[in-house]
Each structure stands twice: as C-alpha cells, then as structure tokens.
Amino acid sequence: QVQLVESGGGLVQAGGSLRLSCAASGRTLGSYAMGWFRQAPGKEREFVAAISWRGDSTNYAASVKGRATISRNNAKRTVYLQMNSLKPEDTANYYCAVGSSASYSTSTYDYWGQGTQVTVSS
C-alpha cells in the first residue's frame, strides 16, 4: 500500500503564496508520476499540475499556469506545489496523487492523499 500525506495548506490573503508538500511512503513504486488536484465545495475535482518521474515533463491547468510550479525530490519521495499570486478562486482542498503518467485525468492516478485545505481571503 502507498500512503500520501499533504501539508502546507492554510489561510492566506489574495496575492500571497503557499508551498504545498506531499510525502509518499509505503511500498516501492518504481517510476511514477505525481500530480496535484483540487476540489472546492460543490464542485468536481480538477487538475492543477503534474510532473513526470524525472521531472522533465510538467503539465499545468490553464487556471494556474504562470502562478504555480510543481517540483519533486525523489530521494525524499516528495512532490511540491508552489502557488503564487493566490486568488480567492484558488480556495479548495488540494490533493496529491501518484500515477503512471503526468496526466490531466484523475483516472491515471492510483493513489490519493487526504488533502490539505487552502483558503484564500479577498
């Protein structure tokens, strides 16, 4: 089994920044992609960003492109999401996931964390 634990969420004013982290533990996964998704109350879970095993391929949702940077440290089995210029519409529960490719689709990902709440005040 694989466990994913997110951290770094919180309350921030619009225009501020946050750095989310997600640490993986459990069985050896081999080469795996990692992604970030978010879900606001009453809305479907949506893609935010994803990164390949080597970190040489990244994808971003249009809504965060230019404001978000995904990175990873394979030695620490950790993925990061740096979010800048935060907006109230970024408010959501942010989830990390492990999957076979740095895809936009939730169906690509096999393991999910419990999420960390990000709240952006106006």
Image (cartoon, helix red, strand yellow):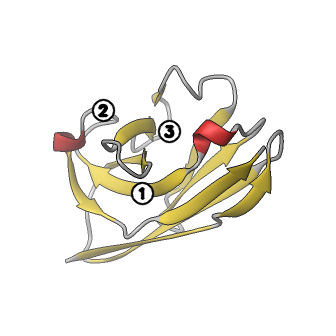
For the N terminus, the quadrant is bottom left
**Which quadrant of the figure has residue 108?**
top left
For the C terminus, the quadrant is top right
Q: Position of residue 41 (x, y in %)?
A: 41, 52
Q: How crowded is mark 3: few (under 14 residues within 10 Å), some or many (20 or more)?
A: some
Q: In this view, does 52 lie above or below 91?
A: above
- Secondary structure beneath dot 2 equals loop
- Which label belongs to residue 95? 1
- The residue to which callout 2 is attached is 103
Q: Between disc 3 and disc 1, whose residue precedes?
A: 3
Q: Which residue is drawn at 83% across and 46% down?
A: 16
Which of these two is toward me, 60 or 33? 60
Q: Between disc 1 and disc 2, whose residue precedes?
A: 1
Q: Position of residue 94 (x, y in %)?
A: 48, 55
- Position of 33 with respect to 38 (left or right) is left
Q: Which amino acid does label 1 sit on?
A: Tyr
Q: What residue type is labelled 2?
A: Ser
| Cα distance in 3D space between marks 3 and 1 | 19 Å
Q: Which amino acid does label 3 sit on?
A: Gly
